[in-house]
Amino acid sequence: MRTFRNPILSGFYPDPSAIRVGEDYYLVTSSFEYFPGVPIFHSKDLVNWRQIGHVLDRPSQLDLDGIHPSRGIWAPTLRYHDGVFYMITTFVTNETECRNFYVTATDPAGRWSDPVWLEDAPGIDPSLLFDEDGKVYYTGNRVPPEGQLYPKEMDIWLQELDLASGRLVGPKTSLWRGALKVAHAQEGPHLYRIGDYYYLMIAEGGTGHTHAITIARSASPTGPYEAYKGNPILTHRHLGRGYPIVNIGHGELIETQKGDWWMVCLGSRPYGGYYRNLGRETFLVPVAWEDGWPVVNPGQGRVELEGEAPDLPETPWPQPAARDDFDESELAPCWNFIRTPRGDFWSLSDNPGSLRLRLKPESIAKNENPSFVGRRQQHMSFRAETGMRFAPAKDGDQAGLVLLQNADFQLRMTYGLYDGISEVRLTERKRGEEKVLASSAFEGDELELRAEAHGQSYSFFWKERGAPQWRALYEGADGTLLSTDAAGGFTGAYIGMYATGREAGNGRHADFGWFAYEPAEA
């Protein structure tokens, strides 16, 4: 028996939506305030995935200026019909206004269109169904038309979408309010035509510990919908906070070319207590059908860390190198900016073989567009290193490594000029308050930086380039501040390179010759 390990996408990859096109599988996840938006992956076996790009990779598609942490792009849905890929999602503003749109492409790795914004499309988590009669149905959630009877009560609704005009047409129809009397935050609807029925699968209970997946069916897309008496079909809330996978929800059903059924869903792996630094990740679980209803992981009823692999030819992809020497013409798809990058602040060509970050006055401790390039933390224990050439010239000039949850929760190891003193510093920012945990005098322009995590214990080291030994700057920093449980929000922790100065221009920059990330022993 061939087995696989969960999660299939580790680190901050929430709200998965996946489809099959022939013998190929494609998957997208939420991206919130990070740019490019909506990472897209390809697989042949549902277990091994490679990122082939981002759906929203141009400023004309995605303007994240000033967006607060955990706003931006929520819960994309991926669909395919008649040679065209569709990605539909919600853009959430700082005022929590929800603006829904879709983009299209004929090649999922290629250039996607600019957005088609949908008018009068309230709520979040839109999805599409291409029905057999040629009609296209939009589903989403909204505040019930008659008002909420209790906090967070939501209505799952449907309307026809006219692709020719890019408009919703005809009446809005309320479909379902969820399966349970304690239901709230009904969201993430996916409507499927399977056999003689339309199946409406949704998420309930909020995206925290009480998250759950429920399902209903109808002979008509507009209902009435019959709730499955076995609901919820998947949840971990009854397993307690000590189970290694928690807050399971937001699922997507997939049928293989062999007729087997699977589900991708989000979940988290707490560690060091109930702390989820890795955010919400993507998991895979088998599905069987009994009496016209899906049974998730028969005999177990939960998502497990290891299971029997799908009956598909195993197709592993070459693993990305642990070290990026920045010798390509474009950044690797693992890298992101915070919000839409504005200005010419980064380059791979100014000093070939390095990533140049120009100093910007914008701060990573504010909801701005800082000079930052980062990637997800994907392991509970890891090591991240970089080599940097940087000569701070003015007070406030600094560059280095940042471990980031959001603007108010982060750990920064930077080299710079601080009140006229040239030194390497570790700064903890927690609840918006900053504290220097350690500092070490240094005068030079070439050094290497290392951050290590062993569970929730984070340690920081540095050395002058070419020195044989690493020097400990600070060991045993509390990593729980990088968890959403401490910081709030919906994202996982990031690790990246950062440069800032109090004055813009003057050509000041930091050159990062390489960056390495790899798992470490716990």
Image (cartoon, rainbow, N blue to C red):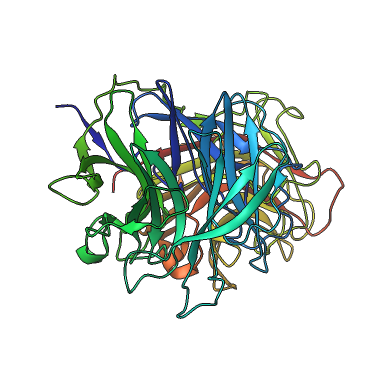
Residue found at the far right of this picture? 506
Q: Position of residue 141 (x, y in %)?
A: 52, 60
Residue 513 image-quadrant placement: top right
Out of 237 and 481, give the one closest to the viewer: 237
Q: Position of residue 380 (x, y in %)?
A: 35, 50
Does 141 sit left or right of 171 as displayed?
left
Does 48 sit left or right of 338 as displayed?
left
Looking at the image, residue 114 lies above or below residue 414:
above
Looking at the image, residue 258 lies above or below residue 7:
above
Q: Quadrant of the N terminus?
A: top left
Looking at the image, residue 100 lies above or below residue 476:
above
Q: Is residue 251 visible?
A: no
Out of 460 and 316, give the one closest to the viewer: 316
Residue name at image x 40 percent, y 48 percent: 281
Q: Position of residue 53 (x, y in %)?
A: 57, 31
Out of 80 and 515, give the one closest to the viewer: 80
How many labels sit on residues?
0
Q: Is residue 510 visible?
A: yes
Out of 63 and 473, give the one closest to the viewer: 63
Q: Position of residue 483 (x, y in %)?
A: 43, 62
Does 258 sit left or right of 318 as displayed?
left
Residue name at image x 35 percent, y 31 percent: 46
Does 125 sit left or right of 452 as displayed?
right
